[in-house]
Image: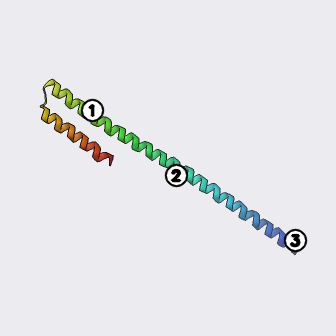
Amino acid sequence: AVQAEEIVAAARHEAEAAAEVAKEDIRKSVARRLQTATEQIEAAEQAAVRQIKDRAVGVAIAAAGDVMKGKMKAESANALIDAAIKDVGAKLH
C-alpha cells in the first residue's frame, strides 16, 4: 500500500511538473505571437504614413506644376497645399 501511494505521489508530481512546463510553453508562444502581431501593426502603420505623405507630396508637386504652367493662381495652389498638409495631419493622428 505504501508503494502504491509513492507511485501515485510520484505520478502526481510528474503530472504537475509537466503541466507547469506546458503552461510556460503556452505563455512563451502567446508572447511571441503578440510580439509578431505588434510588429505587423507597426509596419502597417508606417506603410500607411508613408502612403499619406507620398500622396501629400504628389498633390503639392502637382499644384506647384500647375502654378508654373500658369493654370492656377498662387492663392489657389497655396490653399491646395495647405489642405493636403491638413489632410496628412488628420490622417496621422
Q: Quadrant of residue 51?
A: top left
Q: Which residue is mark 3?
A: 3
Name the amino acid, label 2.
Leu
Q: Residues within 10 Å of mark 1 (few under 14, many from 20)?
A: some
x, y percentage for residue 89? 28, 45
92 and 12: which is toward the camera: 92
Q: Residue at x 27, y 37 (%)?
A: 56
Placement of the N terminus among the 4 image quadrants: bottom right
As measured in the structure, the alpha-carbon distance from the residue carrying label 1 to the one carrying label 3 is 82 Å
Q: Say whether disc 1 or disc 3 marks the residue closer to the N-terminus.
A: 3
Q: Which residue is mark 2?
A: 34
Q: Which residue is mark 1?
A: 58
* SS assignment at label 1: helix
Of the residues tagged 3 and 2, which is closer to the observer? 2
* SS assignment at label 2: helix
In the rendered view, how is the structure colored? rainbow
* SS assignment at label 3: helix
